[in-house]
Image (tube, coloured by chain):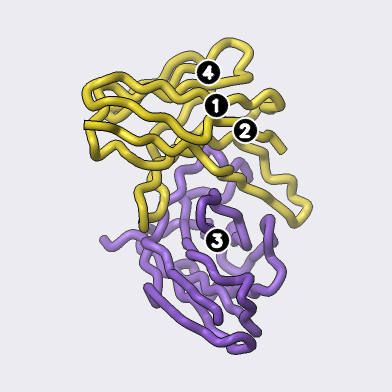
Chain colours: A yellow, B purple
């Protein structure tokens, strides 16, 4: 089961670009990298997903180096409403053995400062 | 289109009581999940259901049972609640059941905040 490591917390001022890096040294060949965002008292929400290189959508960009042992979520020009916990997930294919674990970890708590 | 709905939103139980948390999705998804989230922690998977009629244990299944009633509904039951089960419970669903869950976007409900005294 691939395990991820993220910073516990980060602070940023409004208008700055924020980069959150996730380490996943044991990532498997078939695994995707997915990021979720969670606001207080809400369920997590999908942000972006990628396999390699760079992926961009209207919310964020995801950078994945060639060895895929880490990934970086980039949030351009953050605002106060981006204050949330961000989770990095790395896949583990369904083993078919009757047990499957999806690990969110503790995530990175991003605080945006006015 | 309500997405994933959960009932109740809040619940207080006494130790030893039982209750069922309800979850429903209207996106015609095949897979459904139950998680718990404790203060300052990430989400931990309790049970999941890859398709109607199938359920499997996740990381923390002890003390819980689940039922995939039909494609829309996935319930979580606490037979004898314990204070250690005080948590926020999230239900989620995703479209596919091909086996590579992580490549599959999960949609979460608003959560049920459960307190066991």
Residue under the image location 69 percent in, 65 percent down: B61
Secondary structure under badge 1? strand
Whether residues under marks 1 and 3 lie with C-beta atoms below 8 angstroms apart, the answer is no
Q: Using the numbered discs, state the Cα–Cα distance from disc 4 to disc 1 in whole angstroms.
A: 14 Å
Residue under the image location 53 percent in, 30 percent down: A7
Disc 4 designates what residue?
A52
Q: Using the numbered discs, state the Cα–Cα distance from disc 4 to disc 2 in whole angstroms.
A: 16 Å
As drawn, B25 above or below B8 = above
Report whether mark 4 lies on the same chain as mark 2: yes
Badge 2 density bin: few <14, some 14–19, many ≥20, Cα 10 Å: many
Residue lying at the far right of the rendered structure: A97
Q: Label for residue A22?
A: 1
Residue lying at the far top of the rendered structure: A66
Report whether mark 1 lies on the same chain as mark 3: no
Disc 3 designates what residue?
B36
As drawn, A110 above or below B59 = above
Residue under the image location 46 percent in, 48 percent down: B106
> Which chain letter goes with mark 2?
A
Foreground disc of the pair 4, 3? 3
Report whether mark 4 lies on the same chain as mark 3: no
- Residue B6, horizontal then vertical, whole percent: 40, 70
Whether residues under marks 4 and 3 lie with C-beta atoms below 8 angstroms apart, the answer is no
> Which chain letter goes with mark 4?
A
Report whether mark 4 lies on the same chain as mark 1: yes
């Amino acid at each position: 089961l691939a395990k991820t490591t993220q910073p516990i917390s980060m602070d940023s001022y409004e208008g700055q670009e924020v980069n959150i890096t996730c380490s996943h040294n044991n990532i498997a060949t078939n695994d995707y990298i997915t990021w979720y965002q969670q606001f207080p008292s809400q369920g997590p929400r999908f942000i972006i997903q990628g396999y390699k290189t760079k992926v961009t959508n209207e919310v964020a960009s995801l950078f994945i180096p060639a060895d895929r042992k880490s990934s970086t979520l980039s949030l351009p020009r953050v605002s106060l409403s981006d204050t949330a916990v961000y989770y990095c997930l790395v896949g583990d294919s369904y083993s078919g053995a009757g047990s499957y674990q999806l690990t969110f970890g503790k995530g990175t708590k991003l605080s945006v400062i006015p | 289109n309500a997405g994933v709905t959960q009932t109740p939103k809040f619940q207080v139980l006494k130790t030893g009581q039982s209750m069922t948390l309800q979850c429903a999705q209207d996106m015609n998804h095949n897979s459904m999940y139950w998680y718990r989230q404790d203060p300052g922690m990430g989400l931990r998977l309790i049970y999941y259901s890859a398709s109607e009629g199938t359920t499997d244990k996740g990381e923390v299944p002890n003390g819980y049972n689940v039922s995939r009633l039909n494609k829309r509904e996935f319930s979580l039951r606490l037979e004898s609640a314990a204070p250690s089960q005080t948590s926020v419970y999230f239900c989620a669903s995703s479209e596919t059941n091909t086996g590579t869950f992580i490549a599959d976007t999960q949609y979460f409900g608003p959560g049920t905040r459960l307190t066991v005294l």
